[in-house]
Amino acid sequence: MRAAAKSAAMLELSYREIQSVSLDRLCTVDYKVSTFSYVKVHKMKRISLRSFVIFAILSLGFSPGGLLAADPVKVRVAYINNIQSAVLAHIKTLAKEQNLDIELIPFTRYPDVQKALAVNSVDLGPIAPNGIPAAVAQGDRNVVAVMDLVYGGDAVIVRKGVNVQKFSDLKGKRIGVAEGGIAWIMFVMLLEKNGMSYADIQPANFSSATDMLNALKRSDTDAVNLWEPFVTEALAEGYAYMPRGVDFRDTALGAMNGILGASKAFANKQPDALVGAIRLVLKAEQQLEKDRKLWISIVRGYSKLNDDILQRSLAGIRYAGPHLSRTKLDATATFLFKAGIAKNDVTGKLGDTVDPRFLARAAGKSEAEVLQ
């Protein structure tokens, strides 16, 4: 495609201009009609103008409507069947704008997406902010953070009948958590920020949000550390409430619960396609932020949630825009080391696993402007 465009520029004649030029002119000038060779036309008086034009068109890759389009680049995009991933599902409808062929691949958890990225089974997908620091601490640099993706959607909700008016009221309470997840990390950050430790609560570890909600209903727990849309479901059913003074925006992560990761192999091999995919994500974010009905309709395509739950769930969720927060990932790295989750402290050592080059190109900004 680029070679044909370069040849066309050197020819300096459009299809219509060639039709209007005299044969004498064509017979006295050398024109480059291929990246590899020059065609001399000094002795073309016996060749018709029509034949020359057809030959030039075929050599350059022209059609009367313009240059022949290159085949679209295939990009394997992972998504999770949650509210936040709607933006990734939506880019498939926009793919032609960047000459991409988007293949959507469903997953259920952030860690599974990161594993797939690490072995190059997918090219792009949502991962948790703790994913990159945890991997780097283990010597794995096969996944690259390319942009912040989503903020909000995580919360602590309390069973009705349990009195929590301020953060310190959580002391001694039985709280359901999913240890190791990003919601749990931000909750522990809040404990420390409020002068408490993990030992000050009675944590109960769960493997699924559904199990957490059932435990709350049975009064097996006093509160749960949960995420959307399960937070809204519990509030809508009326057996839980959201206490004041427990806000994940007050953490070092600022309530960021997802970033966009890319396979390092894909980023190295197809940098232009990665930039194109990020452009689609940025455009999709703007469209969904402005059109909540579109956002809901996309989620409804892979979720059984009703529109009311979806609408209420969206209230606390926002997309990140053209930003990549190295400082937040460094803060996460510090937490993982201090909590004993990571054996190595990689704060300030994430290096090229946090790469702003692609986002900067996609957004038309400098790396300094997108990197935070």
Image (cartoon, helix red, strand yellow):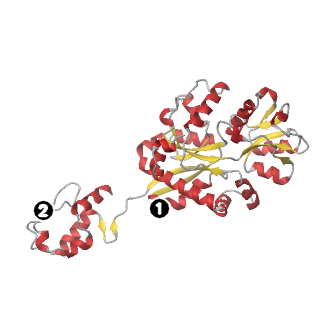
Q: Determine the image quadrant of residue 249.
A: top right
- The one nearer the camera, 359 or 66, is 359
Q: Quadrant of the C terminus?
A: top right
Judge whether 310 appears above or below 23 on screen: above
Image point (34%, 64%), residue name: 68
Q: Residue 238: x, y in percent?
A: 86, 52
Mark linked to residue 96: 1
| Residue at the limit of the structure toward the front, as seen here | 369
Q: Is residue 47 visible?
A: no
Q: Secondary structure at mark 2?
A: loop
Callout 2, which amino acid? Lys
Q: Which is nearer the N-term, disc 2 or disc 1?
A: 2
Judge from the rendering whether residue 76 lies leftward or rightward of residue 53; answer left or right.
right
Image point (73%, 36%), residue name: 187
Q: Residue 351: x, y in percent?
A: 49, 32
Mark 2 = which residue?
40
Q: Residue 262: x, y in percent?
A: 51, 43
| Residue at the limit of the structure toward the right, as seen here | 161
- The one nearer the camera, 251 or 221, is 251
Tell me the crowding category of disc 2: few under 14, some 14 to 19, or many 20 or more residues within 10 angstroms, Cα based: some
